[in-house]
Structures are given as C-alpha cells and as structure tokens.
Amino acid sequence: MGIIKDDVLNKYNNFISELKKEIEELEHKPNQELKEKINNVKKKVELIKSEFLKGIVSQLLRELSKTEPSNKKEFGQEINKFKEIIENDIRKITQKIEKKERELKYRFNFDLSIKFLPDTPGKLHILTIVQKNLMNVFAELGFEIIDGIEIEDEYHNFEALNIPADHPARDMWDTFYFSGGILRTHTSNMQIRILKTRKPPIKAISLGKCYRRDNMDATHSFQFHQLEGFSIDEKINFLDLVRTLYKFVHKYFGPNTKVNFVPSYFPFTEPSAEMSISCFYCSGQKNDCSVCKGSGWIEILGCGMINPIVLKNVDIDPEKFSGFAFGMGIERIAMLKYKIPDIRMFYQNYVEFNQLWR
C-alpha cells in the first residue's frame, strides 16, 4: 500500500477533471462573461496550490520522516511523482488562462487595424521630413549625398578614425558586437570608406541610423540617426568650415540665427569645436525657455578640422590636403525644430504623432 491514499487521488483527479471542463467552456463564453469565468478558474488554481501542494504534499513529506527506513525511498518517489503531476497540471492550466487573458485584453473591443480613408493623404514621418530638408540644404551648398552601411568592422568605425583599441573614447562609443562585425556608432565610418576609394577634392554628406549602448530616456536612445558631412581639398581651413556651417544655419533655421563655437575634443578632428545657435524660440530673452533653458544658445553639432592622422590612414597626404568634418543628431534637430520633448516618441508608432508636432 502506498503512502498516498486512494481518496486523496480520487479527490484530486475529480477536481482537475472539473477544472479542465471549465477551461474548455471558456472557448464558448461571450466576452462579457469571460473575465468572471477566468477569475473563477484562477481561484480554483490557487485552491489546488493551498489544499494539495501546501497542504497534503507538505504533510506527506513531514510524515515521511516517521516511516520505516525500508519504505522511505518508495514513499518518497511516490510523493514526488504526485507533486510533479500537480505542478504540471497547474502549469498547463495557467498557460491556457494567460492565453485567454491576452486575447481578452488585446482582441476585445480593440481594433489594431487602421481605417483607410481614400480621401486622406498619407504623411511622411517627421524624421524623414527633417532628413529630406537637411539633404536639400547641403545639396544647395554643393555636398554630394552618399548612402552608408550600418554593419561595420572595428577598423572603419574606430581605428581609422584615430580611436585605437585602448582609447578612452571607446567607452563613449560602446556599441553592439556580434560575430559578423559591429553596428556603427556614427556615420563617420563612411568618411573612411569614401576616402579609401576616392581622392580629393571631395565634398559629401552621409546620413542614417547609428547605434550605441545607451539607456533609453528622454534624450538618449540605443538607436538614432546622424548626419556626417566633410570636405577635403587643398588649402581648406577652419574659416571654410565656419562659412559652410553659417550658410547651413541661415538656410535651415533662418537668416537672423547667430552661431557660436566653443573648443571641444574629438579623436578624429583637430582642432575641434561644439557649435551652438541662438535660440530661435526666445532669442535669449526668457529665463524659463524650455528649449535653451534661459542660456540663449542651443548646441546642435560637433565639428573640426580632420585630424592629419585620419588622412594618413586613408593614404591622403596631410601636407598637401586638409579638410573639415561635422556631425549632428537628426533626432536632436527634429526635437528642437518641432519642440518634441522625448526622443522615444519617434519610435512608438503613434499614428497621430506627425499631426501633433507639425
């Protein structure tokens, strides 16, 4: 005779059989009754746990210590088998209930489709609009537009840009690594690829998605869009960079926008600078301005003269040629232009987003 009595097994089997019938009936219940029936089943699952697992099984395990040593192994196996049967039944029932709850939550009175209205024109996403506008401005300034690759190797993404393996900037530009390479951290990789195959004079921009190991918050994302521009020729100097960016700012933000350069550091440019523009919302007149925070200035991009080391890495003579480069986050430009408070809004698939921020 085993340690588990027949009346216990019969009671459990009858309980489970009735519960399985109730679950089968859920398929035929209208939605208004489904939630109540699901709650009833969940209560019975908790009853199984308390009465059989925490109650009978726990009691049997306590009694096992008092049995004859010769019976302990057999009785212990019997208890564990009964326990496994209960746990498997609970797991299967729970999975079915969770499935019905998901159906109730996402299918009942929730239409995932978008109503098609033939007289309503589609709209471009704001990021697409900003990219197109930026491309148009730089095309007018004589820049060639070049597409780029997102899956890159460490040489083109880091080393050729004067960021060796032991450089501290590697931490700043940490990215996603996999067996086939890495996801690029900036569009500067295309500067190297273009200069490897073509020789100056070159004047081009490249834009697209980039990736970094950033935590998502209102101003950071592990995926973002960037625009990189550069120009290389004989006798190019910092004044050429300033003139180019002045023209860009006046075309895109308005002719009365002022520009300010502050010295900075980037491994691939020397000298380097951060460029800010005068606040186009308050003109520096409001201390509580939500865009410039009362400073009157908005930082929009980094820039500088291409480091001679980078030119040497692509077999360009830095004694003969020089160049400048600049890079800007397209999300940042869009957020400033349209006063969008949170970068995550670009990626949340909210249909009304474009209309709200036009």
Image (tube, rainbow, N blue to C red):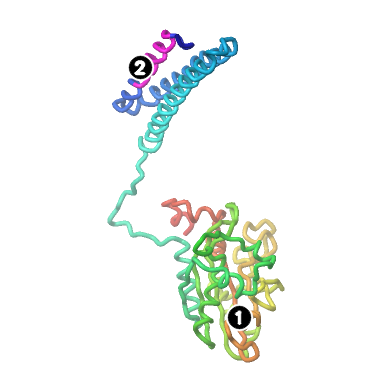
**Marker disc for residue 335:** none
Residue 214 spot, x, y in % from top left: 60, 56
Q: Name which quarter of the figure residue 279 lies in.
A: bottom right
- From the image, tell me which residue sits under label 2: 18
Residue 236 spot, x, y in % from top left: 62, 87
Identified at 50% across, 77% down, the residue is 138
| Residues at circles 2 and 1 in contact by the CB criterion of under 8 Å | no
Q: Main secondary structure of the magenta part?
A: helix
Q: Name which quarter of the figure residue 44 lies in.
A: top left
- The secondary structure type at the circle numbered 2 is helix
Distance from disc 2 to disc 1, alpha carbons, whole Å, reads: 75 Å
What's under tag 2, amino acid-wise?
Answer: Glu
Q: Nearer the viewer, residue 355 or 92?
A: 92
Q: Which residues are magenta?
A: 6-20
Q: Name which quarter of the figure residue 184 lies in.
A: bottom right
Instruction: Decide: few, some or many residues near mark 1? Use Cα within 10 Å; few <14, some 14-19, many ≥20.
Output: some
Determine whether 131 is above or below 78 in the image. below
